[in-house]
Image (tube, coloured by chain):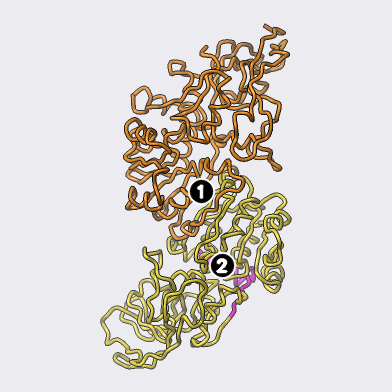
Chain colours: A yellow, B orange
Amino acid sequence: MGGEVKSNKKVVLKNYVTGFPRETDMEVVTDGEGFKFPEGGGGGVVLKNLYLSCDPYMRSRMSKHDEPSYVPDFVPGSVITGFGVGKVLHSDHPNFKVGDFVWGMTGWEEYSLITSPESLFKIKYTDIPLSYYTGLLGMPGFTAYVGFYEISSPKKGEYVFISAASGAVGQLVGQFAKLMGCYVVGSAGSDEKVDLLKNKFGFDEAFNYKKEEELGLTLKRYFPEGIDIYFENVGGAMLDAVLLNMRLHGRIAVCGMISQYNLEKPEGVHNLMYVVAKRIRMQGFIVFDHYHLYSQFLETTVSYIKEGKITYVEDVAEGLENAPSALIGLFSGRNKGKQLVVVARE
Amino acid sequence: MGGEVKSNKKVVLKNYVTGFPRETDMEVVTDGEGFKFPEGGGGGVVLKNLYLSCDPYMRSRMSKHDEPSYVPDFVPGSVITGFGVGKVLHSDHPNFKVGDFVWGMTGWEEYSLITSPESLFKIKYTDIPLSYYTGLLGMPGFTAYVGFYEISSPKKGEYVFISAASGAVGQLVGQFAKLMGCYVVGSAGSDEKVDLLKNKFGFDEAFNYKKEEELGLTLKRYFPEGIDIYFENVGGAMLDAVLLNMRLHGRIAVCGMISQYNLEKPEGVHNLMYVVAKRIRMQGFIVFDHYHLYSQFLETTVSYIKEGKITYVEDVAEGLENAPSALIGLFSGRNKGKQLVVVARE
């Protein structure tokens, strides 16, 4: 296979984005030179990409930053990268062999050469749909696990609120919280998602934030005793409303702030004084810092899946051609459940 | 002494305050009925008040709140209460005897009946100026201790920034941080205070925030490597500038936000996204939750004082007549060091 050349379709960033990203900020092209398999000895692996993950944090990578962030900016003219699931077609690395399935950072293209395959996770359970490793069993699911169990210090019976609750992370946080015996309410941006939360994921309550006049009063209605744990995915006005409604010694696990990513200047948050009066702990986290917990997460979650204690909803876009629109749909909330792109099914 | 009546001068709140408080929101009156010593058996103690503490948190008590806060609102027409040092003149409680010195919640008046004396701390070291128990060895000093050692998870060599640094709490946080081997910078609102920070309290650097154009750049100048620990006393624009300049895994101990207390609507804080990217922990705290650590704090701090390792600056107002102006001066930053009021010296 060394030296072989294959045609390689890919999604490239055309230009850095300001404000709301558009499909036309990306381009689907077929590399003129094609993908050339390495001659061997380089220590890398070649992946055939199967499933690609659309994640909100990718928005930040589409803009140019003067100072480096925790993930590097994309480069205009180059292929977009992100989490995905792939099959090993060629390996110069002792940990991987042809035919292995892996998940980790890869390119938005048909074939990728991964030069540092140590960063890939070999997929242990292949009897579970492989696409789940872009979500439930991949980075977003692991984020839910770390953010809930490690960052939120949850206790049975506590009151838990989750924003963007039907998304890849939120749906799982809510189910973990229910399994622990918490009271769980989620917010989402459509009645259909609210229905999912209540009738599919087993949340105690859920509401469509777009239909609420005054989020502070809405939360007061759902949490007359206040909120012990807020799993923060959106920021802005929702965070202000939550701060008003937190209980003493409440915890806010700050996972993301999707409502702010496309604004030129983020909204102001006005109610931070409650952090003192209510002794609130706000803790930002990124799952990369917690990779040592991955196998613990995996075993726990796979058991829950096999026992039917956890359910999962995916929103599947077919083909690389539809990848730009799938990614952008995250920011208007078009996806229902985990958004992913199928490049190939095997 | 039971049944004896003494004239009792006191400071009462005239009306609830909105916006910036004025001296005329309070009134110094001599109670027409005087102070009547209890006949005995009630379990209380009578204090002769010596020193009263002016603290920023008292601003909140001057306004009416629909929902109860962690400290109750003052009542118009009634005496203001706060931390102070007093001498026991009469005791119906087995833990206290006549002549004991105590600190704790008392009235802004010459004589107070304390009906729940369990809340008072008996003063163990009377060879240290008794006024210190309104500051360095009282609530503010203990707040500095808890906020630094318990909340900030400090390590030797870390970069520490303190706002309102010459105040009762800040001056001590900075000295604790220097004793631990941290690099310490403070901000204050006058050149005279900056001089105190650098030349009296031993901060590595200090600046007058009123002379800075762009606080984000100022902090970048003082912390080219970023801030590990921010001891937050002011809120608003300073917090935004700090968020920009925090290091990965930084901690923000949120003690207060004095810049916001007199605003109708608090300023918006825009840079909270850095809480995620930098994995910042923001932790609000109130010293009341940590009273079990008081004797540990006291022994540590008294040793430091006796070894000359800690210095302390008080701003002393003479007489109850000057108490309203002393309290209000906190909010314009008129005080240099810990603001207190002398009611009587013995």
Mark 1: few, some, or many residues within 10 Å (few <14, many ≥20)? Answer: many
Who's the residue at 63% across and 28% down the image?
B24
In screen coordinates, is B309 left or right of A214?
Answer: left
The mark lying in front, picked from 2 and 1, is 1
Residue A125 at x, y percent in the picture: 50, 76
| Image: A134 above or below B8 | below
Along the line of sight, which residue is nearer the eye, A291 or B215?
Answer: B215
In screen coordinates, is B204 left or right of B272?
Answer: left
Q: Chain of mark 2?
A: A
Along the line of sight, which residue is nearer the eye, A112 or A20?
Answer: A20
| Image: B331 above or below B269 | above
Mark 2: few, some, or many residues within 10 Å (few <14, many ≥20)? Answer: many
Residue segment shown in magenta: A297-315
The residue singled out by tag 2 in the image is A169
Who's the residue at 49% across and 79% down the image?
A52
Look at the image and say whether residue B253 sits in the magenta stretch.
Answer: no
Q: Amino acid at mark 1?
A: Gly
Who's the residue at 56% across and 59% down the image?
A148
The residue singled out by tag 1 in the image is B236
Q: Amino acid at mark 2?
A: Val
